[in-house]
Amino acid sequence: MNKNIAMLYKNLNNIINSYHINKFRLILILLTGVLLSPFQQARSEQLFLKCIGKYEINRGSLIKPDWETSYLKINLDGLISIIYNKGKEKEGRTLIRRNSYTITQRDNRNIVKNIYKINRRHRTYIVESPQRNRTLIGTCQKGRG
């Protein structure tokens, strides 16, 4: 009887040890596969525009220049676009329709600050500022990014 128990005990130890070795090998193979595989970063297509415009409604004081230059980076997947205006970076939600892009910029309280409308065919752009009652009208050209 003791011989049978001793044999069972040895066989049980061999099975457990081989299971741990196989488990270790599997984890090692998975880790090397993850480390050696290249990480892919999803990037969407973007359009870079340089837009120059003049204020048309309620221009305010004429001491400051009447024109303004904005650089737009429009995400063509309809996500968030970036606007560089006067050295500040602003983000807005992009809506793409036939021949136009509409970027809506909101503040922290979800109130609309500016609405950028770009016509792709005529290369014109309009910035409406509902809070300040100002409208900027201008033209755009493709930039290098």
Image (cartoon, rainbow, N blue to C red):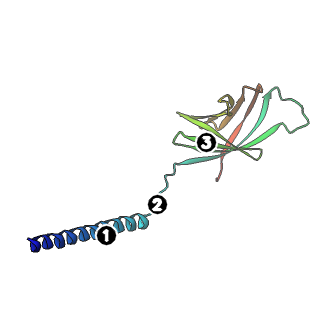
The reply to whether dot 3 and dot 1 touch (C-beta < 8 Å) is: no
Q: In the image shown, does 98 or 86 lie closer to the viewer? A: 86
In this rendering, would 22 be left or right of 70?
left
Relative placement, left or right, of 132 versus 145 is right
- Label 2 secondary element: loop
**In percent of the image, x 70 and y 38: which residue is there?**
139
Is the C-beta separation of discs 2 and 1 under 8 Å? no
Seen at 82% across and 26% down, the residue is: 58
Residue 40 in the image: state x and y as whole percent: 46, 58
User: Mark 3 highlights which residue?
Assistant: 81
| Tag 2: amino acid | Phe
- Secondary structure, mark 1, is helix
Residue underneath mark 2: 39
- In the rendered image, residue 32, in percent from the top left (x then y), is placed at 39, 68
Distance of label 3 from label 2 (alpha carbons) = 24 Å
Three-letter residue code for mark 3: Ser
